[in-house]
Image: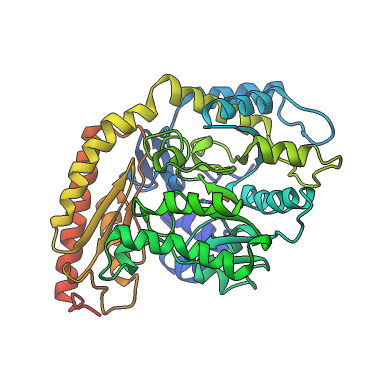
Amino acid sequence: MTQITNHMPTAALQALDAAHHMHPFTEDAALARKGARIITRGQGVWLTDSEGNRILDGMAGLWCVNIGYGRKELAEVAARQIEELCYYNTFFQTSHVPAIALAAKIAELAPGDLNHVFYAGSGSEANDTNIRLVRRYWDVKGQPERSVIISRHNAYHGSTMGGASLGGMAGMHAQGGLPIPGIVHIGQPHWYGEGGEMTPDAFGLMRARELEAKIEEIGPDRVAAFIGEPVQGAGGVIIPPATYWPEIQRICDKYGILLIADEVITGFGRTGNWFGSQTFGIRPHIMTIAKGLSSGYAPIGGSIICDEVYHTVAGSGEDFNHGYTYSGHPVAAAVALRNLELLQDEGIVEHVRTVANPYLAERWQALADHPLVGEASLVGLMGSIALTPDKARRAPFAAEAGTVGFRCRERCFANNLVMRHVGDRMIIAPPLVITPAEIDTLIERATRSLDECHAGLKSDGLLTAA
Ligand SMILES: *Cc1c(COP(=O)(O)O)cnc(C)c1O
């Protein structure tokens, strides 16, 4: 067996990585010249890299390691399940205990009559399921012309052809012939960036009413569904104004279109409730789930489906011709179930709501006083700060968007803090188990990184507004 271990020198690992491993969302040739940072261990909110640095993971991996790294209970349940039944499918009138038990647990946790789970291997796959499911629903209802799905610019719904089409990422649509037909986009509720002189509440209403205008433009009898993240994550942690979701809900109800809440990030405690829909008062017909479902310990996602949609499709008299080899994979399902039990037994969602969010909110908000910061916002344990050269005008930098954000992220890396940048916004979503003492460390490192970034911008003449 080839020995590719943590104990190889970093340079050797980087060379092999550059030679053979093509990275997602990466300019690989540039990374090959620089060498990837190689992560070797994780414990709680802490990562260790191949150089022995101890890094505070302010992003919980990719918004997923909600329970924190290194939980033995999850290792044990995976090992036990592999020995007992490593794999079986759920296609041909068979089922297995992990898929059954996890579906029942998800139905118990999910609000309202979201009682049915269709499994996928990831959030992207689950959103592909949702496209086919809502179109199938209207087919069975005798309204096959209802096929258009409305989403939003700067939304993120995954990277498959369907998921990326639902998403509203301009950079993704520019590659590979996207979006696929039948998916249209309206404006996002991003007050800081796009609200101009309007109040947040007036802007939130205006952006929600773009849904009504779009439905009227397409024809109400042609619209199948609206999809949205309760809080846009990859788009920059955009927390919508309070007026936004109630108006979206009203419009969906008025036209009888299905509402899909993409809870891949906001699900399982991230916003201080089990689901972001509860935090924002949304009553979806379908929820997309992944990431925190297993805290990232195993790849698994799915759609939680309400009674009406489920019974319509399930009772159509025909198969729903859709599924994945790994739908409900027993090892992933067993790990996810144990993860949810631990979140519940250890009161981790309550910890977010009553301890971690209030403590972080105060310290995070104080960052808005930093000369480089135009806004600091937080819901539960997902937050953002907008960098600006001119706080009063919320002005963007003269430099190309993302230049300053990238420089700030580099300072964070140098200070052993993982904080991501989206354009010139810095974002965090730490593991839900983060303690007040660890929050202090996060804030100290973030502040130091902002100071260093600010000094660097000043000396390089980049503190100018567009
Ligand atoms: C990450 C993400 C997805 C895609 O999930 P994958 O598991 O990467 O396919 C979909 N929706 C949202 C809101 C996400 O954040």
Q: How is the image coloured?
A: rainbow
Q: Position of residue 316 (x, y in %)?
A: 82, 41
- 195 is higher (above) or lower (below) than 66: below
User: Residue shown at 39%/47% (left/top)?
Assistant: 50
Give left or right: position of 304 versus 455. Answer: right
Give left or right: position of 298 versus 360. Answer: right
Q: Position of residue 6 (x, y in %)?
A: 46, 43
Give left or right: position of 233 versus 425. Answer: right
Q: Quadrant of the N terminus?
A: top right
User: Residue shown at 86%/39% (left/top)?
Assistant: 317
- 268 is higher (above) or lower (below) than 123: above
Q: Quadrant of the C terminus?
A: bottom left
Give left or right: position of 387 versus 432. Answer: left
Q: Position of residue 426 (x, y in %)?
A: 31, 58
Residue 196 appears in which quarter of the rendering? bottom left
Q: Position of residue 416 (x, y in %)?
A: 28, 49
Q: Is residue 39 visible?
A: yes
User: Residue shown at 73%/36% (left/top)?
Assistant: 311
The number of discs equals 0
Looking at the picture, tell me which residue is in the foreground, 42 or 208: 208
Residue that lies at the very extreme toward the front in this rendered image: 254
Looking at the picture, tell me which residue is in the foreground, 332 or 253: 253
